[in-house]
Image: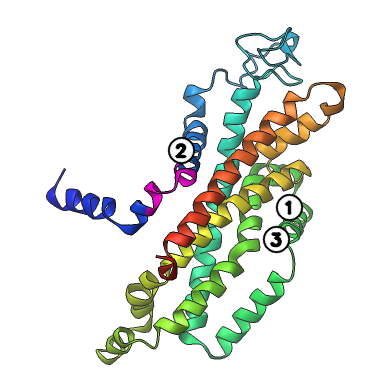
Amino acid sequence: MTTSSSGTLRRFFDSDIFHSFRQNPVVMIAALVTVICVGGAIFAPWIAPHNPFNLKELDLNDAFTPPSWQAEGQPKFLLGTDDQGRDILSTIMHGARVSLLVGFCAVLFAMSVGVTLGLLSGYVGGALGSVLMRVADVQLSFPSILVALLIDGVARTALPRDLHSEIALYVVIFAIGIANWPQFARTVRGSTLVERNKEYVQAARVIGLHPILIMLRHVLPNVLGPVLVIATLSLGLAIITEATLSFLGVGVPPTQPSLGTLIRVGNDFLFSGEWWMTIFPGGALITLVLAVNLLGDWLRDALNPKLR
């Protein structure tokens, strides 16, 4: 490790943010849960007990096997199996992989669009800023799930069924991202309106820097704090939105089941006694979203200078 790297780590461990993190046991538990969930999803193909998508390993005789601690349970199926004999624990790990992929990509897309439009609206201002913010205001008047449903419905109508099945994952990412960009745009615009009148921005104008360079080099780094907070909180919202779409049958395709798809499938058997098929995926979804939201709340407070 180089001297600069060790110095950076030392400054991080001595920072107020890390001190706040160490002093909050709830946040430490939330971070641990998040790491476990994300790690389990990323490495699911290698650490999952079974491969739920390998048809050669599936046996319909194992269908509806209860959790291992019940009388008819089997040790190799810790959380039981579904109607096709797939291991519930393995399907949860693979389903979380899809849910997190959609959530991360949707947030990155929404952040890219929102930050770009917010910077332009705040720095350039004028008619462009007014039009962009009026569009954001109109979209904010509708729930994000309705916007995502509308975009997905338009895509299903405009595209052939085979083509839509192939790009359904990208359509969901685009729909959720477009539904959530106004929060980023309004926050960045407000911060940019403050930053553009400060001395360092005026000095950059005096020396003749191009406005795009001023926005990217000087203004953008100083407005990223609130953006990171919104991105963390939006991740949980994006995962919930994707799960809702999949539960309604308009999300990711059945060949790439997410946690929402698993909950929808298990819900069909909930009242026939196979409760584990929907309870465990639902619990995994709640745990993941709660942990992410707790981290987002802590990050919002930690980056707020008024609360230090």
Which quadrant, please, contains the N terminus? top left
Residue at x-position 68% and y-position 17%: 80
Q: Nearer the viewer, mark 3 or mark 2?
A: 2
For disc 1, the neighbor class at 10 Å (few under 14, some 14 to 19, many from 20) is few
Q: Is residue 188 above or below residue 294?
A: below
Residue 185 image position (x, y, % from top left) = 55, 72
Q: Amino acid at mark 3?
A: Ser
Residue 133 image position (x, y, % from top left) = 61, 80
Q: Nearer the viewer, mark 1 or mark 2?
A: 2
Residue that protrudes farthest toward the left in the picture: 3
Kindly identify which residue carries mark 1: 159
Give how far apart the Cα atoms at labels 3 and 2 are. Answer: 29 Å
Q: Is residue 211 above or below residue 230?
A: below
Q: Which residues are magenta?
A: 20-28
Residue 18 image position (x, y, % from top left) = 34, 52
Q: Earlier in the sequence, mark 1 or mark 3?
A: 3
Residue at x-position 50% and y-position 37%: 33
Residue at x-position 73% and y-position 71%: 141
Give how far apart the Cα atoms at labels 1 and 2 are. Answer: 42 Å
Q: Amino acid at mark 2?
A: Leu
Kindly identify which residue carries mark 3: 144
Q: Amino acid at mark 1?
A: Leu
Q: Earlier in the sequence, mark 1 or mark 2?
A: 2
Q: Earlier in the sequence, mark 3 or mark 2?
A: 2
Colour pattern:
rainbow
Which quadrant, please, contains the C terminus? bottom left
- The picture quadrant where one finds residue 66 is top right
Kindly identify which residue carries mark 2: 32
The secondary structure type at the circle numbered 2 is helix
Residue 188 image position (x, y, % from top left) = 49, 73
Please give left or right for residue 78 compared with residue 13 in the image: right
The secondary structure type at the circle numbered 3 is helix
